[in-house]
Image (cartoon, rainbow, N blue to C red):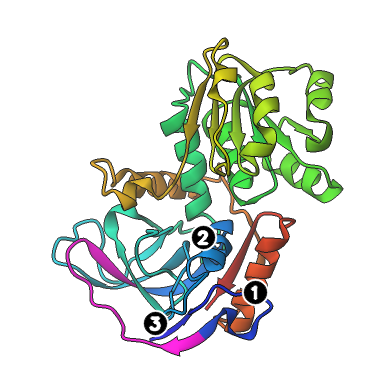
Amino acid sequence: MKAIGFKQSLPITEENSFIAFETETPIASGYDLLVKISAISVNPVDFKIRQNAAKDTVLDMPKIIGWDAVGVVEAIGDQVSRFQIGDEVYYAGDLTRSGSNAEYQLVDERIVGRKPTSLTNAEAAALPLTALTAWESLFDRIKVNSTTDKGKTVLILAGAGGVGSIAIQIAKKVAGLTVIATASRPETVAWCEGLGADFVVNHRHLKADLEKIGHGQVDYILDFVDLEGYWDLAAELIKPQGHIVSITGSNSPLNLNILKTKSVTFSWELMYTRSMYTTADMARQHEILNEVADLIDAGVLKSTLTTTLQGFTVDHLKKAHRMQESGTTIGKTVIEF
């Protein structure tokens, strides 16, 4: 099969930052599906791993990354019970295994969902990683109850990004929250409003903008951009007994003491935790992806696709990485095979 990978962590402008090569098509066993891939999307995790996985070494074999794919089941392992050959599926994969930047990929059926029937391959490929991240942030970490928590406020930092774009929709249309998203450019403000945000505030003067709309403090904060940069302000803006969730990490230890007097809860969210540790509830991701597919097909949620590159090539993968590294992309970028 054809695959695209890298042997060294090089700047994306370097010729060998990605290389195309041929490798053996893997064989499905156990819970694995062998998926013939139709489309992939690129996320910040892709370029971060490309930049760091082979920093001080040259790998013997190119590393295949990529976490988001849509495709058709070509073969199944002997323990598979949820899918059959010929099923159309979508998934975000597993950090510890070979990625989706290839013609075929093995993926555990417990983290795979049925492709939404109403979407094209490109539209569906934009969703798995971001939808799982947003869903887990709201319902697994914060444990939002759409009945008792209806109307509570959630501040989404980086509303126009990949995760923010689907989180706005899930928070508003599934969880029933009052959604406040951050954005600064006219096009990102319009994008967030179009997805259902009740308010859009400028991250450059966040505190003042929140006070202007009558929400000087919020019940929940979802950080999808820069935890370290927002930490002190987040502690100030969160309501007593509120909850902060972050996906971004921190280069230095966080001062949790500033949350103490308000009894604020802080949670990390890593979408890969279930697959990395084969948790007892690993199949919950299969269920979430199917729930998202049902909501998409019912017209409640919509794809966050904004850019489609036609053709699985080194040039297109480099272009998608450059776009992600710019930090200015709106929604999701997909490569269709």
Specify few, some or many for label 2: CA neighbours under 10 Å numbering under 14, 14-19, or 20 or more: many
Q: Is residue 184 magenta?
A: no
Q: Which residue is identified by label 3?
A: 61
Q: Does dot 2 land on a helix, a strand or a loop? A: helix
Q: Which residue is identified by label 2?
A: 124
Q: Is residue 120 visible?
A: no
Closer-to-camera residue (94/251): 251
The CA span between labels 3 and 1 is 19 Å
Locate residue 329: give its quadrant.
Answer: bottom right
Residue bounds of the magenta highlight: 20-35
Residue at screen point 36% across, 72% down: 105
Residue at screen point 79% across, 43% down: 189
Residue at screen point 47% across, 54% down: 128
Give the amino acid at mark 1: Ile
For discs 3 and 2, the disc positioned in front in the rendered view: 3
- Left or right? Give the position of 193 relative to 281: right
Closer-to-camera residue (301/51): 51
> In the rendering, at what x and y percent does residue 279 appear?
26, 44
- Left or right? Give the position of 58 relative to 317: left
Q: Is residue 33 magenta?
A: yes
Tag 2 near tag 1, CB within 8 Å = no
Q: Does dot 3 land on a helix, a strand or a loop? A: loop
Give the amino acid at mark 2: Ala
Q: Is residue 48 visible?
A: yes
The CA span between labels 3 and 2 is 30 Å
Q: Which residue is identified by label 1?
A: 12
The CA span between labels 2 and 1 is 26 Å
> In the rendering, at what x and y percent does residue 59 appear?
42, 79
- Left or right? Give the position of 325 relative to 53: right
